[in-house]
Structure formats: C-alpha cells, structure tokens
Image: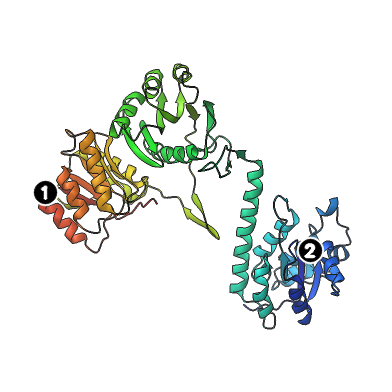
C-alpha cells in the first residue's frame, strides 16, 4: 500500500529547531521514539520519555559519539522489507523503523553515522520516511493520522540523497587542491579529482605557474574539442574557441588554428592532440599563452617552454571520457548525460540533402569537421571552415543572426581569399532564413544544420534559390 503509518521513529539531530513540536505530534499518534544519546537527553529534559539507541542495541556510544547508530539492530530495522515475512522474522523481537529524522553536523564536521542512516532510509523509501531538515516536519506532522504517501517518501529520499552528495562534496573539498581563488579574487576554489591521472582534473602540471580556476575551465573546453579530433590544435579564450585546425604536424595545426583569429587568441589556452615538438613550442612562445595542454611533449619542446617560466604546461591522458555533467544551481543541481557527437545522426552518410547537389569529398570532410566543432561551441554558434580549419567562429550569441554575422566578419577579416567556397555548421536549426542568407552572402557554399524549425521550408527555399547545398542532421548539439 502507498500510505504508511509511522509506528516507530529514530531521531538523531544536531539542529533542534522544531524538534519539540515534532516529538509531541509523534507521541500523540502513539509513535515509539528511539533517539541518539544527545538527542534523547534533550527530549527527556523537555519532559518527553524516549528510548536511547544504546538501550536498544545494548552497546554504549563509542569514540566520543562517533559510533552510536552504526549497529545491525538499527540498520536492519530501517532496511527491512516490511512486506517480506522472512526479513521480518530475521528482526526477531525488533520492530521496523518507519521514520528516520536526522540532520548532519554543520561544517566543518565529519558525520559518519548520519549519512549511513540517511542512505539506509532513502534506499528503503518504499516503507521508510527520511527527514533531513526541520522545514520538512510540518508535512510529516500533517501526514501522521493517515500515514505518509509513497510520493512524499520518495521526495524526502531524493532530497536526502542530494544532501548527502553535497555533504560528501564539501568534505572532499577539505581534501582537494586549494586554488589561489575562484572565478574572481574574492571567491575561494578547490580542485576535486575523480581519478588521478584522468581528464583535465587529473592532468599533470609539468612546467609553469599553478593552474587557476579559470585556467581549468578553459582547458576543459579546449580539450573537449581536441580529443574529438586526432592531430588537432585548439585555441580557447573564455570558454569559446578562437581557432581549431587539423594537420599532419602539431606546428601546422597550431599555425592554422592561430590564423583563425590571432587577435582573440592572445592570452588563450591551447590544446593539442598531437606530439608537441620543438618547432611547435617555438611558435607557441611567440605569443602570450596561459596554458598548453597535450598528450605528449618532446624534451626539446620542454626546453623551449622553459624560457617562459609562467607558461603552464599540462600533460593529459586521452582517457578522459565522462558519462554525466553536473551543474550547480540555486537550491540544487542539474544532472545530465554527456552530449555525444558520435551518434548515427552525426555521421555524414546519414545526413539528408535538402537543397543543392552533393558536395565533393573534401567539402564533405570540412562539413563534418565544422559540425563537430560547432557541437562543442557555446550557443548560439556558427562555425565556418575551409581545408580542415576554422576560418570564422560566431559563438555565445543571443541570436543566430549575430552568430552568423560574427562568423562571416571574422572569416572575411582573416581569410578574404578563402571565404568563397567555404562551408558552415550551425549548432541548432535556423528559425528564419535571415542567418542562412548572411552566410550565403558571405560566400559559403554548403551548410549543415539540425533542421526541425517550423520554418524549415523557407530556409530550404533560401538555400535552393542561392544554389548552395544544405544538409540536415536531425540532431541538435546546443551548448550553453
């Protein structure tokens, strides 16, 4: 049944806000209360007669209270399947615990028993109510006469697990690597590493100043693109690529990426999915760069970089895949699966040609390259490419028209001779033909975009009228 009456409750709290009112309501409904010694002393001193955990288990609290509820009798009573006769028989003379009311030691405390109780109760939310904050007490009090609903118990369990996750994260921060400051000097920051030697967080600083919070963010954005493209160089500034290029050597890839937008590249971060040699290192130090990250550096390259004591050199492993992205927002978190650009819809052979004729193999390769780069570029985004390199990027714009204008302007400024006949990719559909028209007027001859707008036909008509090739992927890669 969904509604569950509470007959037995365990209370162990450090924050006693609202506790007397809650205890009075529980006792009025005939609920048996067990409490940790400190909580029991507080309740008994306020004329409530409750049992202590020690009285139930027969074991005293140990290590100054560090071990009090960590006992099979307590956890079995919480975890028991109350509809399974065999599990109930295992409890012998014990009764199941139907409600667990716990809150954790405030920072910088390190609670052990509390999180264990919370996780046990949350795991068994089918039968057990887990409350972790005084603001939840009113709802429980109102539910006592008829019993808590499964919906309530699941919601409380969800909030409890988020609480323990955040609590563990704060504890991990105490053991993480303290950075000089966060995004701004008045903010504190810590690096938490999931697995040593893996990904950007596990990359090894082999030369230069310590990494900053902003350095890590930019390197993460740069490496996300670089690992998608073997033999690539990527330059990032404030989370946005200024240039991406493919080439047979690190030097050629870096020079092509730099040429995409040499002004914006000043003070940026470079990610190279190549062996960085002496020639590439010499070219890099001609400009001001914050960080260079790569999978390997020759000894000669490191000797060149040594002339720039502040330049950070990071050695990274290619083993850096992650399945989820976690973002903190006010009051909670957003969790999503990572966006893969290796789906069948991302394969050019599965794209749909809706205007113009099929392009050459070389142009098709540029379209695929541009599509993969735009997928990792902050929206609204347009990427113009030619011969395995970006020549114009419009990113982080609030509308697609401005993104197209920025990309074309950049391309015309740095590559006036190469814009004609180039290709472009859009990370989301064109809501109107206007942005596409800007690309057409700039000389772009082929475009790839997701499609899916209610005005797709007008966009397709604009492409047909201009005589350009237009491909639809059917998948969007929006990156805020």
Residue beneath the point at 71% across and 58% down: 104
Q: Find numbered disc 2 in the image and state the secondary structure of the residue it sits on.
A: helix
In this view, the residue in front, 124 or 400, is: 400
Residue 278, how many percent across, how many down?
40, 18
Looking at the image, the residue that sits furthest to the bottom is 145
Residue 82 visible, this angle? yes
Q: Quadrant of the N terminus?
A: bottom right
Residue tagged by mark 1?
A: 467
Q: Residues within 10 Å of mark 2 (few under 14, many from 20)?
A: many
- Badge 1 element: loop
Residue 449 visible in the displayed image: no
Q: Which residue is mark 2?
A: 74
Q: Is residue 213 above or below residue 281?
A: below
Q: Is residue 343 left or right of residue 351?
A: right
Q: CA distance from mark 1 to mark 2?
A: 75 Å
* Residue 412: image location, x then y, percent: 20, 37
Number of residue marks? 2
Q: Quadrant of residue 262?
A: top left
From the image, state whether disc 1 or disc 2 is nearer to you: 1
Q: Which residue lies at the image location 48% right of the left edge and 37% below the top edge?
A: 215
Instruction: Check contact, mark 1 vs mark 2: CB within 8 A.
Output: no
Residue 350 percent across, percent down from the top left:
27, 50
Q: Residue at x 72, y 76 (%)?
A: 6
Name the residue: 10% across, 53% down.
465
On screen, residue 9 versus residue 250, left or right, reads: right
Q: Quadrant of residue 298?
A: top left
Q: Position of residue 430 (x, y in %)?
A: 25, 56
Mark 1 burial class by Cα count in 10 Å: few <14, some 14-19, many 20+: some
């Amino acid at each position: 049944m969904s509604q569950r009456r509470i007959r037995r409750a365990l209370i162990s709290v450090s924050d006693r806000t609202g506790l007397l009112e809650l205890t009075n309501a529980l006792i009025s409904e005939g609920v048996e209360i067990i409490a940790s010694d400190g909580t029991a002393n507080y309740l008994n001193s306020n004329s409530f007669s409750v049992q202590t955990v020690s009285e139930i288990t027969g074991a005293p609290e140990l290590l100054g209270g560090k071990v009090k509820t960590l006992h099979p009798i307590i956890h079995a009573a919480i975890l028991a399947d109350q509809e399974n006769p065999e599990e109930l028989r295992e409890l012998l003379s014990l009764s199941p615990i139907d409600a667990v009311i716990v809150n954790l030691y405030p920072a910088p405390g390190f609670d052990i028993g509390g999180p264990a109780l919370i996780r046990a109760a949350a795991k068994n939310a089918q039968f057990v109510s887990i409350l972790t904050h005084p603001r939840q007490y009113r709802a429980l009090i109102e539910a006592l006469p008829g019993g808590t609903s499964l919906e309530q118990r699941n919601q409380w369990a969800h909030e409890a697990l988020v609480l323990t996750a955040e609590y563990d994260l704060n504890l991990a921060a105490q053991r993480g690597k303290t950075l000089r400051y966060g995004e701004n000097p008045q903010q504190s920051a810590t690096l938490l590493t999931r697995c040593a030697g893996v990904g950007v967080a596990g990359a090894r600083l082999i030369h230069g100043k310590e990494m900053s919070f902003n350095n890590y963010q930019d390197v993460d954005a740069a490496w996300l693109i670089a690992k998608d493209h073997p033999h690539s160089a990527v330059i990032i500034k404030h989370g946005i690529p200024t240039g991406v290029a493919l080439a047979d050597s690190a030097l050629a890839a870096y020079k092509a990426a730099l040429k995409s937008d040499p002004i914006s590249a000043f003070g940026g971060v470079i990610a190279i999915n190549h062996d960085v040699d002496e020639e590439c290192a010499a070219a890099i130090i001609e400009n001001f760069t914050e960080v260079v990250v790569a999978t390997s550096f020759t000894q000669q390259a490191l000797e060149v970089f040594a002339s720039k004591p502040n330049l950070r050199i990071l050695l990274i492993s290619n083993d850096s895949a992650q399945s989820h992205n976690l973002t903190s927002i006010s009051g909670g978190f957003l969790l999503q699966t990572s966006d893969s650009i290796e789906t069948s819809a991302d394969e050019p052979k599965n794209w749909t040609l809706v205007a113009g004729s099929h392009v050459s193999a070389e142009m098709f390769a540029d379209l695929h390259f541009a599509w993969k780069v735009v997928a990792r570029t902050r929206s609204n985004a347009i990427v113009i490419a030619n011969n395995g390199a970006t020549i114009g990027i419009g990113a982080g714009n609030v509308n697609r028209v401005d993104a197209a204008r920025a990309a074309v302007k950049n391309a015309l400024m740095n590559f006036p001779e190469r814009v004609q006949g180039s290709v472009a990719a859009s990370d989301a559909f064109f809501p109107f033909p206007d942005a596409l028209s800007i690309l057409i007027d700039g000389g772009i001859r082929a475009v790839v975009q997701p499609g899916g707008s209610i005005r797709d036909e007008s966009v397709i008509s604009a492409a047909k009228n201009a005589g350009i090739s237009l491909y639809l992927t059917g998948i969007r890669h929006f990156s805020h």
